Image (cartoon, grey):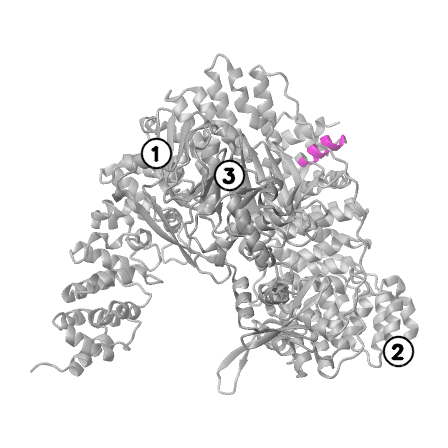
Amino acid sequence: MVDQVYRYLEPSTLTADNGAADLRLATSGGHIGAERSAHPHFFEGLLAHSDQVAAALLVVARVARTRFYVPPGMLAAVLRRADPVVTSDGQRLRFESLSADAGVHVRLDLLPESLRVPPSAPGTTNVDVNVPLRQALARVGRDTALHLAVGTELTVRTDEATVTEEKVPLPDRWLKGFAEVQVAGAAMRPVLRADAVEARRFVRALPAATGGRSAPLWAVSGLRGLRVTAAPGRDAVSIAGPQRLRVLEPLLRFATGLRAYAAAEADPGRPAPSTWELQLADARLVVTLSPEVSRGFSGEGGVLLDLADPASAADAELVGALLKFEPRIDVLRLAASAGLPPERVLRALTRLGAAGRVGFDLHDGAFFHRELPFSSGVLDAMHPRLVTARGLVADGAVTATDHGFAVRDGEREHVVRAETGGHRCTCPWYARHRDDRGPCAHVLAVVMVSRG
Amino acid sequence: MAETSDQVSERLAGLVSAGDLTGLVEALAGLTERTRKAVWPLLKDVCPQTPAAVLAAVGCAPRPRALVDATPCMDFTQAAEALVVQVLLDRRPPWLPALAKALLTHWPAPEWRLRVVRALVRAGALEPTVTDGHEELLISAIAPARYWAEPDSSVLRALRDDPELLDHMVWTMLSTESCGRSLQQHDHHHDSPPEYRPDPSPRPWATWRHALVTLSAEGAVDRDRLLDVTLGALTADRAAPALPWFVSLHQALAPTADELAARRDVYLRLPAADHGPVLRLGLDAARRLLEHGAVGPTAVADALVPALSRPEKGSATAAIALLERAAASLPDRSSLLLTLTPALDHPHPDVRERARTLAMQWGSAPVPERPAVLVDEPTAPTPTAAGVVPVSGPEELAELFAHLIEEADDPIEVERALDGVLRLARSRPQHGARALAERAAYLAGRFPGPWFGSDVRTDLAALTVVWLTGEPPEPAWPGRQVGYVTERSDDGSSRSRAAIEPDCGLFALRRFRVHEVAQVVAHGGTVPLSLPATTDGSLPADVLLDRLSTVSTAYPRDLGCAFLRVPPEELDRLLPRFVPGAALDDVITLRRYAPQWRRVVGAPCDLWGRPASPMVGWADPTSPIGTVDRVVLGALDRRDPLRHAALELEDADHGGRPEQVTAAWTLLLPHHPDLLAAHAHPRLARALTKNRSGAGPLLEALGRSPRPAGPPTWSALVLGLAAKETAVQVAAVDAVVARARSGGLDAAGLAEQVRACLADDVVVGTRVSDGLAEVARADRGSAEIVLDVLGEVVPAVAGRRDGHRWVETAAELGTLLGRPVALPPELRALAADCGSSALARACRRALSVG
């Protein structure tokens, strides 16, 4: 658990007067360009499609305060208020949030056409979305001229007495999920699309609740549009917990289309993450669902082998230093700048994604730079399996045997065997998840020892 | 002479025992803190569940936490509460603020605690801010809705008794998101009291709603502020359950036209709400604002756009009606055509039709129906079953068990494990055996334990322990509990014990089989016979004969499973292999198996003899008498399908993964879809109203079976389409689609079961019609078959409330496929009668096709 301190100079506000609304989002922590800033300020200007933007911001805020899955035995889910994160790349604004159970990630991309003026600087920060602000956002109409300010210029800074400070305990797994959801997106391809009418019908026909431990479901293309099935074919998109996709509902009236993305090499029939992009006027709302309702993004572990590789750490450090809040990271150009082959740059970007330093825009098919505004150092040390594996290696717990490797973990000794298609371990974690969620700590330790 | 602490404690204990509350208050009043501390150890264990004991604890507990721990989760009379307050005021311990915090934060927090804290605030012993952050407790604390509360208590009276609450606490409460749900529950309890209350008559005068409306009428509550707070709650993007109470408060406040006009901007945002009642409130307010000239028609039209795109017919229709009214005052209505656009693509044809008519009245060119997108997708080839490879050695078997005891998600893997452990009973893995045995022993201890049949993983964990330790398994649970019997002993006392009957359904057969495997493994193993050769569960006769040639002792359940897996047309080849006996009888019985299915509907009794809801079952009076030892006879026995059906409904309640249990059934009956469907009916009956039925794998198996099917299968598919559980409903749609694609669907047979289920009122008709509509979305072939089914069902829907849904779906499919829809004479007459009912309109649309 990490205490994330949100320190706002004043609460975010929306004031409306005579057909105009002034939305001032208070900021806490983050960056302006490469510089850390306590209260970044990087946008001030009018927005197009004011009612759409207001409704979309409410969806982002709603996901942040929703727990779609309550584990059995949990009497009352403590609703932790993790504020949305906003990123400016100098051309567009992206608002992101992750649900309390780390299973639903949402990102609102306000494209350059929806901003009357471009952001004044690139940067990332947390923004306060409080109850009165939500109330005011719900009243923004189509004809309202919506002015947005992300942050406040220091010259008009308010009295110190209005500073609000809130310490919010954020579980490691939630922070990890926020970072790793980007890595999941990087492996996806577009699979399904629907026009506005079909998008409205499909989303509204999804069940409001499935109850209990729901079986994995998929969306497929049918005779008259999309339908849900339990027997997926080749071009199917996993839609575990379909009720979670209904977060799109308030925006359906603005939708111009819907696209669904699935992992390019997903094993048909196995639960997999999926991304749903609702196309709006000069904007996109992107919802990524975890493979199962009871399984947040935090447990994916898909990047652990890369993280365990010291060579990729050096590459990531080099590549990270070259990033400048690009809206689309050009891998070839970056490879040329770094003097690395493109595939190593891609691995480095994946590693940076797991650390919350880049995101992935599926529509553009490219990484973009953003630094998650969470406590520094947290994201580096939040992979418990990796930490355990490093501990095992440091303790000399890995020994080579005739049959592979013996790894002593406390009282137990587990056997790791290298076989075609990967490593196998005798530990209960591997027995339960096999290769679905990345390697176990023992396999990681063996890989580290093997690589020297 | 002063009393010693022993004497004081003895006197107080006496008062506690006598329940003398007034005496206790007097006795406690003069005590010093030192004496209270001294007597506490002697008092703290005296009758902790009485008001007198609580009073003693309040008077003597040395710390806030000790006091809170000593006060149980119970409520007192108002008089007793007053005495608690008096004792605390007499005592005035220095930690009174800390006590207030402890009282309010301790969980569970009985309602009296907030009332006591408020009484102390009123007496000046505590600051009013002590209750900040605990406003939600106020909802049920000041006028409890529970049946033992004071009969004449009401929120109104409580607020009048403590008017300071209206200064701050009530307003904060109304602004707290989670309070909306609690307020709704509280007021609902008074509006519709449960029957167990001593006086179950409604008490609307006791509600929060009544209190706030009354006090605002009296001027004690600022009406404008109350209206603003109410509208604020309705527009604050709150969760749906937090909203109905504010809607009801708004209705009770009945704002005037001037009040509406003063807040017109807010009211005009309400039609954009996701929550239906809020949206309707917004539509009503917009109508009134329009009528009173407080807003112009264009502003109303703009506000209606979100409501016109709502999927519910009622909301969209109401919005169109209001739009029509707004347009009436405009000379040029063409400017409103854009507003109508969402309704032209509305999912409901009535809405589309009305929007098209209106658009043409306003000067638009005729708007055609949105052309249907018809995509002829190549039919995917039917997947062929893959071969099943036996486990190669103990290492692989250990790895397989390590996974299956955690998640037995693949029934073929379970079969491989059972096969492997019988063959490798005397072998052990070289590595990890101890860790696996420990883990398996731990998991085998999970509730309800192995051999009850409700959790495959637990049974496999117990089997793993048997394999790795050589210890024989515990006996299996002998049968099924069907009720209780009362026994009288010689001394006249009586006691109840469980009544157990033999059970030979698939639920029991599966666990008996795994138990048999465990017993054989404990005795050294054998050559297994029943491992399916392919993933569809099939076992060719030649493969079984090969295995039989190498086995000295065939174990009965293993052999029975093998017989059921042999294709019926190959059973003849097995006959020469057996001498007269049980095995030969089983083969002959299977070979002659020709069920005479009869549909039965009844209300079987549950464990306590109470009749369940009516259920459908499939009886085969010609089936053999089942026994627990003979898998074949047990599986075939369907003489009395409703006998244990109500109990089978509850099988899925115990254990963690009901779908893993039923997945094993599909491999037991790979060639008898109707028999599998008959066994599936109790699970499907559960899926009609509950989750966790485990019916999904059964429907998937019925869908992919290449064998011809009959009425039990069609009945199972209909129940599946009507399931409440999403996964089951989707599996049923998939199964119908799969059968339609493979040519194995009898539309007339399916329609007959739809009609029967509708007639017996065992399904929700709209779920079945929606399910069939979903089937028709899959491909052209499925759509054609669904239209065939609807053609047979529609004659039976006249007079049903959901009749229009069936006709509507038929009309849409008829339009899509270019096929006319035949209607029976009474529906034709209804269509010709120019009636405006939904059914009449749907019939007219159906007749216009082709």
- State which quarter of the image contains the N terminus of chain B: bottom left
Q: Which of pointers 3 and 1 indicates the residue nearer the eye?
A: 3
In the rendered image, which quarter is residue B9 located in? Answer: bottom left
For label 1, the SS is: loop
**B207 to B441, vertically: above or below:** above
Q: Nearer the viewer, residue A289 or A120?
A: A120
- Is residue A105 shown to the viewer in this render? no
Q: Residues within 10 Å of mark 1 (few under 14, many from 20)?
A: few
Which residue is denoted by mark 3 in the rendering?
Answer: A108
**B442 to B281, vertically: above or below:** below
Distance (Cα) linking label 3 and label 1:
39 Å
Q: Residues within 10 Å of mark 3 (few under 14, many from 20)?
A: many
Is B811 a magenta residue? yes
The amino acid sitting under disc 2 is Pro
Q: Are marks 2 and 3 in contact (CB under 8 Å)?
A: no
Chain letter of the residue beneath label 2 in the structure image: B
Q: Nearer the viewer, residue B311 or A19?
A: A19
Percent position (x, y) of residue A396? 56, 73
Q: Residues within 10 Å of mark 2 (few under 14, many from 20)?
A: few
Q: Nearer the viewer, residue A241 or B69?
A: A241
Chain letter of the residue beneath label 3 in the structure image: A
Which residue is denoted by mark 1 in the rendering?
Answer: B254
The amino acid sitting under disc 3 is Leu
Percent position (x, y) of residue B543? 87, 68
For label 2, the SS is: loop
**B264 to B196, vertically: above or below:** above
Q: Which residues are magenta?
A: B809-818
Which residue is denoted by mark 2 in the rendering?
Answer: B580
Q: Residue furthest front?
A: A339
